Image (cartoon, rainbow, N blue to C red):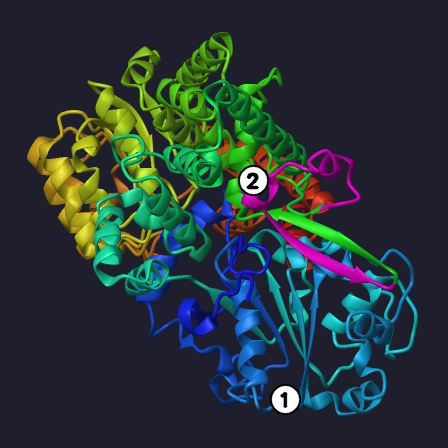
């Protein structure tokens, strides 16, 4: 097997290095506006813990009958970069070749999209098979004739040049029928070609919205290593139990490194750092950039140490210059291809040709040789997607290339925006432009960042953080960039008129909470507003940030499924806080029992003035518990879309402070503006969720000015999204809502 950046001639045995990967049934779509590796980090934990809901399966079970139904024919295996999709494919082929697995099949045809990218003229399925497997020429007819015993594996859909165009409407139905390669692949995926054959497709999450999912029988997610498997990987890598245990203990003490070690490729990077760079910086890395800077220096040291003794003193400077020049060439390639959304580089590309003869290339780039009739083509990629992003950031920081506007938040996440693919690049850029890493790279690699560029970046970061705090816009990626700097003076330099933090609509990981705490712990005094709407907050997370919640004036926790334990934490904040005046708990699974706990807590301090409870399970009985708290201190209680009966208690009908129905006043005009703002910054999936909630305005309210304006603006927004939507299923749902909005 090829094991990440295995060198030419080096052999790695599966029995020594293969560690089982957790495969989970179910279609687990990721929010594409976040960087997929970062988004998935925390989600993996909940998936691994919910074994009763998400069944763990072995590779041999991929095509077994789910829930006793017909055997799955089309299987989609997804997972973030470096999680082990190709390794899984190699393991399947390895087991099949040894008669150890997948015995329901008589034959497996394996194709990679890297190879299919090289086909630039009409072809057919037979030719696609024989171009890499000429020895099958005499047997292929028999193989295809028994298609119900045939498994076709298509690996790396996200690397396909034509991945956006596979939902074809021009099909081929015979193996000898010529067509464009995208039409052959699309016909195979949709069952028009070899309909009885089994097909397995692997892809990163970023590309799965372009797969015609209607033809997929089973969705499988690779969730990576568990904690025990990370430890097992360390044992196999170091081949020394005592050394492996000591290294694992070092990583376990570093929350950031341990969190990312669920990705096998990243686990390898960490092991490489530990092996080559003991006490390199004198302290454990605190940020993502620290880890990758150490990775860079460790591999450079490994590359040069065998030759270092042959250098004369006067040659050392020249050697360092050669290293830095090569790093910048790799960085330029990484940057240009990242901006083009490309992770594969072909030897025919001019940018790749410029690297020919550089000894460091094989240290950081993996090479695959694709053989064509009469010629060969070398295909390169970085050891991991994040390594490419890091090199791109090094290039941008250490050259005259202008700083990109990656910090600018896309206001409308339609097709064509970056969908978060530059988030990690931007964090790396911030970390590289920090004082400690500027000094380290200069000392170890000979790379210099101009002081003017460092100062310009830091000033821009402070300026933009100040603006975002003032207007309450999304701020999470900026907080990560601030964290990468590890300079408290920058946080202190952020001096907004009001401190408002909006991290809504992003499923937060522990790393996200860490950067939020890092910033707010450096900022003293009252937090005007903290928006945690729809972040998947748990009881444990609320306890973790409870000291911050006590400083909040306005706290928004809606669209989180809050259990009684979480409600108890909120109640504790209400009992202790001298600041909180507005609390949002809309669509948070609040029932009468939870509301009773909250109302009792409000009585302790009597500071809360507004309570939003829309879209919950509250009945008349629960609302009565708030009667004595209105209108003082509670001036406003919004409880629309709850479980009220037609006959309301008499005590509520006279309470102007309690709203259970829509009215025609200024409050709903402000609510309309808030809804539109939420929808504009939401992904299409999130937009559908919001539309499902807010399109339930009673008919008698539709004549009010605010309601007419709301529906008109929503319709315009939905029409714009439909125009750019490439997912048929989501497009149909958007069109359905648009018809409702135009009634």
In percent of the image, x 40 and y 48: which residue is there? 272
233 or 43, nearer to the observer: 233
Residue 408 seen in render: no
Q: Quadrant of residue 571?
A: top left
Task: Compare marks 2 and 1 and give the one earlier in the sequence.
Answer: 1
**Contact? badges 2 and 1 (CB < 8 Å):** no
Q: Residue 670 placed where, x, y %?
A: 45, 28
- Under tag 1, what secondary structure? loop
In percent of the image, x 28 and y 54: which residue is there? 618
The Cα–Cα distance between marks 2 and 1, rounded to whole angstroms, is 38 Å
- Report the magenta residues as a range: 346-373
Of the numbered discs in the image, which one, if any, rests on residue 564? none
- Under tag 2, what secondary structure? helix
Q: Quadrant of residue 683?
A: top right
100 horizontally vs 188: left or right: left
185 horizontally vs 393: left or right: right
In percent of the image, x 63 and y 54: which residue is there? 207
Q: Quadrant of residue 554?
A: top left
Q: Residue 197 placed where, x, y %?
A: 71, 83
509 or 502, nearer to the observer: 509
Q: Residue 245 placed where, x, y %?
A: 22, 57
Q: Quadrant of the N terminus?
A: bottom right
164 or 696, nearer to the observer: 164
341 or 136, nearer to the observer: 136
Of the numbered discs in the image, which one, if any, rests on residue 388? 2
Task: Relative to 586, say whether 445 is above or below.
Answer: above
Residue 127 forms part of the magenta stretch: no
Q: Which residue is mark 1?
A: 105
Q: Residue 642 placed where, x, y %?
A: 35, 53
Q: Residues within 10 Å of mark 1 (few under 14, many from 20)?
A: some
Residue 367 forms part of the magenta stretch: yes
């Amino acid at each position: 097997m090829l094991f990440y950046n295995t060198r030419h001639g080096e052999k790695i045995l599966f029995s020594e290095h293969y560690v089982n990967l957790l495969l989970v049934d179910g279609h687990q779509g990721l929010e594409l506006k976040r960087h997929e590796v970062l988004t998935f980090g925390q989600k993996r934990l909940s998936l691994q813990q919910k074994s009763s809901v998400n069944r763990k399966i072995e590779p041999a079970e991929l095509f077994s009958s789910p829930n006793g139904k017909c055997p799955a024919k089309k299987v989609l295996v997804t997972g973030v970069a470096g999680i082990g999709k190709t390794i899984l494919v190699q393991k399947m082929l390895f087991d099949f070749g040894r008669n150890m697995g997948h015995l329901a099949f008589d034959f497996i045809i394996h194709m990679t999209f890297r190879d299919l990218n090289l086909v630039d003229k009409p072809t057919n399925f037979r030719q696609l098979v024989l171009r890499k497997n000429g020895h099958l020429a005499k047997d292929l007819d028999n193989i295809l004739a028994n298609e119900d015993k045939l498994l076709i594996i298509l690996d790396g859909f996200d690397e396909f040049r034509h991945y956006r165009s596979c939902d074809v409407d021009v099909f081929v139905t015979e193996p000898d029928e010529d067509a464009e390669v995208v039409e052959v692949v699309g016909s195979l995926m949709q069952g028009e070609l070899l309909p009885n054959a089994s097909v397995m497709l692997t892809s990163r999450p970023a590309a799965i919205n372009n797969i015609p999912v209607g033809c997929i029988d089973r969705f499988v997610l690779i969730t990576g290593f568990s904690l025990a498997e990370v430890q097992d990987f360390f044992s196999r890598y170091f081949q020394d139990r005592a050394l492996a245990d000591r290294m694992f203990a070092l990583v376990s003490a570093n929350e950031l490194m341990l969190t990312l070690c669920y990705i096998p490729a990243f686990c390898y990077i960490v092991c490489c750092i530990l092996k080559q760079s003991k006490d390199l910086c004198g302290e454990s890395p605190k940020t993502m950039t620290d880890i990758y800077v150490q990775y860079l220096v460790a591999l450079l040291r490994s590359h040069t140490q065998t030759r270092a003794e042959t250098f004369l003193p006067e040659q050392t400077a020249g050697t360092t210059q050669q290293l830095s020049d090569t790093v910048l060439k790799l960085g330029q390639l990484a940057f240009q291809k990242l901006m083009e959304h490309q992770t594969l580089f072909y030897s025919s590309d001019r940018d790749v040709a410029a690297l020919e003869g550089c000894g460091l290339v094989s240290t950081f780039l993996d090479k695959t040789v694709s053989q064509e009739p009469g010629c060969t083509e070398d295909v390169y990629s970085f050891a991991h997607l994040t390594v490419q992003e890091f090199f791109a950031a090094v290039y941008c920081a250490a050259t005259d290339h202008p700083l990109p506007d990656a910090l600018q938040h896309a206001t409308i996440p339609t097709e064509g925006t970056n969908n978060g693919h530059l988030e990690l690049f931007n964090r790396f850029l911030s970390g590289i432009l920090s004082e400690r890493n500027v000094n380290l790279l200069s000392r170890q690699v000979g790379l210099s960042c101009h002081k003017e560029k460092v100062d310009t970046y830091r000033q821009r970061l402070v300026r933009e953080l100040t603006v975002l705090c003032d207007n309450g816009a999304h701020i999470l990626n900026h907080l990560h960039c601030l964290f990468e700097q590890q300079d408290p003076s920058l946080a202190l330099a952020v001096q907004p008129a009001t401190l408002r933090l909006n991290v809504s609509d992003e499923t937060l990981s522990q790393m996200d909470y860490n950067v939020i705490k890092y910033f707010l712990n450096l900022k003293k005094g009252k937090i005007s507003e903290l928006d945690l709407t729809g972040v998947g907050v748990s009881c444990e997370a609320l306890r973790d940030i409870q000291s911050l919640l006590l400083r909040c004036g306005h706290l928004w926790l809606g669209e989180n499924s809050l259990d009684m334990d979480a409600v108890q934490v909120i109640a504790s904040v209400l009992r202790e806080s001298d600041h909180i005046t507005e609390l949002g708990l809309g669509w948070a699974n609040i029932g009468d029992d939870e509301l009773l706990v909250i109302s009792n807590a409000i009585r302790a301090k009597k500071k809360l003035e507004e309570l939003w409870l829309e879209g919950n399970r509250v009945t008349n009985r629960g609302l009565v518990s708030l009667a004595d708290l209105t209108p003082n201190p509670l001036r406003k209680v919004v409880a629309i879309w709850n479980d009220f009966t037609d006959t309301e208690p008499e005590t509520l009908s006279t309470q102007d402070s309690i709203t259970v129905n829509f009215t025609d006043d200024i409050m709903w005009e402000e609510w309309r503006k808030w809804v539109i703002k939420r929808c504009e910054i939401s992904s299409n999936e999130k937009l559908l969720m919001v539309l499902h909630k807010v399109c339930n305005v009673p008919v008698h309210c539709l004549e009010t000015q605010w309601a007419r304006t709301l529906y008109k603006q929503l319709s315009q927004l939905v029409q714009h999204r439909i125009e750019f939507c490439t997912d048929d299923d989501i497009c149909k749902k958007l069109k359905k809502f648009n018809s409702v909005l135009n009634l």
